[in-house]
Image (cartoon, rainbow, N blue to C red):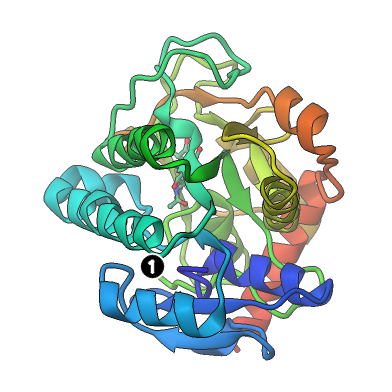
């Protein structure tokens, strides 16, 4: 697994260890935290584009599947520095895929994004909805999807591409969570404001074509997302063909609805300030999760927004004492 010290990766490591799987993590610790990699997983610090290292790990550890989480994820950062995003997310992933193919790996699971879809695509978004990403981040993810499709046709590598909607919350057992103090995620930042670690929440734009004018997203608990990876892994190991899946709940919440939910969970008003739109943000992203439910039997288990928010706040308290 690449990026196993990161937010989603570390939850997936625990989910795999909890059911007794063997896990090998490669992470350069640029944003990941070593202490959040579950004990029991083998850990290597290094770069996904270091072919010699990756090849050695695959051979020594007898890896049969690569789950590729490592990558840069901040939309506005990608708008400001697109070349860094194309390097980290596309160029390095190309090298990783080459190493993986040459090593004879059969299965590849890739973290893609709901932001690959066209802004005017019908909501909820089906996997076959038109793609027209607007940020360099989202384009870098779609480019990698294309690489995987081409490589799968040419070399027989089988993939599961998971298009994540808005991932939030933390491990219900409190073992890991979102630890990047510079994280830009709405629920992470709202949790920081709720604990007094940030003076107020900025609401980015109130003039979107949405019911209350603020951005609408399909917030999904990271534990349910980790479970989706295990199902995709089992399907590939069982011989399933290459498939792309949305991972979201199929319900949209606006920024204002999230603020209201945080206030309900904490019982206190959440200081918020209305500001302009943020570059690269689409108005609405809601998933049609029909395919992953039907094909993999994925069932959300933590989809209450209150549970998502309270787990995020609990982690924030624990992590940043
Ligand atoms: C997130 C992910 C992205 C993923 C996408 C899928 C990160 C950093 N971004 O992007 O990788 O592809 O979901 O849907 O993980 N907002 C505010 N104030 C804030 C922060 C956010 O108003 O302080 C608003 C945004 O304008 C947006 C919504 O809240 O409408 C969600 O923003 P955010 O949590 O940053 O996620 P996305 O940009 O959707």
Give the x, y percent position of residue 238.
Answer: 75, 47
Mark 1 Cα-neighbour bin, 10 Å: few <14, some 14–19, many ≥20: few
Q: Is residue 288 left or right of residue 79?
A: right
Looking at the image, residue 200 lies above or below residue 16:
above
Q: Secondary structure at mark 1?
A: loop
Give the x, y percent position of residue 105.
Answer: 49, 59
Q: Is residue 108 left or right of residue 259?
A: left
Give the x, y percent position of residue 86.
Answer: 20, 48
Q: Quadrant of the C terminus?
A: bottom right
Q: Is residue 292 left or right of residue 10?
A: right
Q: Which residue is label 1 attached to?
A: 182
Residue drawn where x is 30% and y is 56% of the image: 98
Toward which corner of the image does residue 168 lie, by quadrant?
bottom right
From the viewer's side, name the closer residue of 13 and 81.
Answer: 13
Looking at the image, residue 34 lies above or below residue 20:
below
Toward which corner of the image does residue 147 lie, by quadrant?
top left
Does the image show residue 310? yes
Does the image show residue 250? no
From the viewer's side, name the closer residue of 196 and 238.
Answer: 238
Give the x, y percent position of residue 270.
Answer: 61, 54
Looking at the image, residue 18 lies above or below residue 107:
below
Residue drawn where x is 62% and y is 64% of the image: 194
From the viewer's side, name the closer residue of 110 and 99.
Answer: 99
Asked whether mark 1 lies closer than 8 Å to ligand 1, one says: no
Residue drawn where x is 69% and y is 65% of the image: 170
């Amino acid at each position: 697994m690449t990026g196993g010290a990161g937010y989603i990766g570390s939850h997936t490591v625990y989910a795999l260890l909890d059911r007794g799987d063997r896990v090998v993590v490669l992470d350069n610790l640029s944003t990941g935290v070593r202490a959040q990699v579950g004990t029991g997983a083998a850990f290597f610090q290094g770069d996904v584009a270091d072919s010699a290292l990756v090849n050695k790990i695959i051979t020594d550890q007898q890896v049969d599947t690569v789950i590729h989480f490592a990558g840069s994820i901040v939309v506005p950062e990608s708008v400001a520095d697109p070349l860094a995003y194309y390097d980290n997310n596309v160029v390095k992933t190309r090298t990783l895929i080459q190493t993986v193919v040459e090593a004879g790996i059969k299965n590849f699971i890739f973290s893609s994004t709901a932001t690959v879809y066209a802004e005017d695509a019908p909501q909820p978004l089906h996997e076959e909805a038109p793609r027209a990403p607007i940020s360099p981040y989202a384009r870098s993810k779609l480019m990698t999807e294309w690489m995987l499709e081409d490589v799968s046709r040419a070399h027989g590598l089988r993939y599961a591409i998971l298009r994540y909607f808005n991932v939030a919350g933390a491990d219900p057992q409190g073992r890991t969570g979102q630890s990047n103090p510079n994280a830009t995620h709405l629920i992470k930042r709202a949790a920081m404001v709720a604990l007094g670690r940030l003076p107020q929440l900025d609401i980015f734009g109130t003039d979107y074509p949405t019911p209350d004018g603020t951005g609408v997203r399909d917030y999904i608990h990271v534990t349910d997302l980790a479970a989706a990876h295990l199902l995709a892994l089992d399907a590939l190991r069982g011989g399933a063909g290459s498939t792309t899946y949305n991972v979201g709940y199929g319900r949209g919440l606006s920024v204002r609805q999230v603020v209201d939910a945080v206030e309900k969970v904490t019982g206190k008003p959440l200081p918020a300030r209305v500001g302009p739109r943020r570059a690269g943000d689409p108005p609405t992203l809601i998933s049609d999760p029909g395919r992953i439910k039907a094909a993999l039997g994925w069932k959300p288990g933590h989809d209450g927004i209150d549970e998502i928010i309270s787990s995020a706040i609990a982690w924030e308290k624990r992590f940043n004492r």
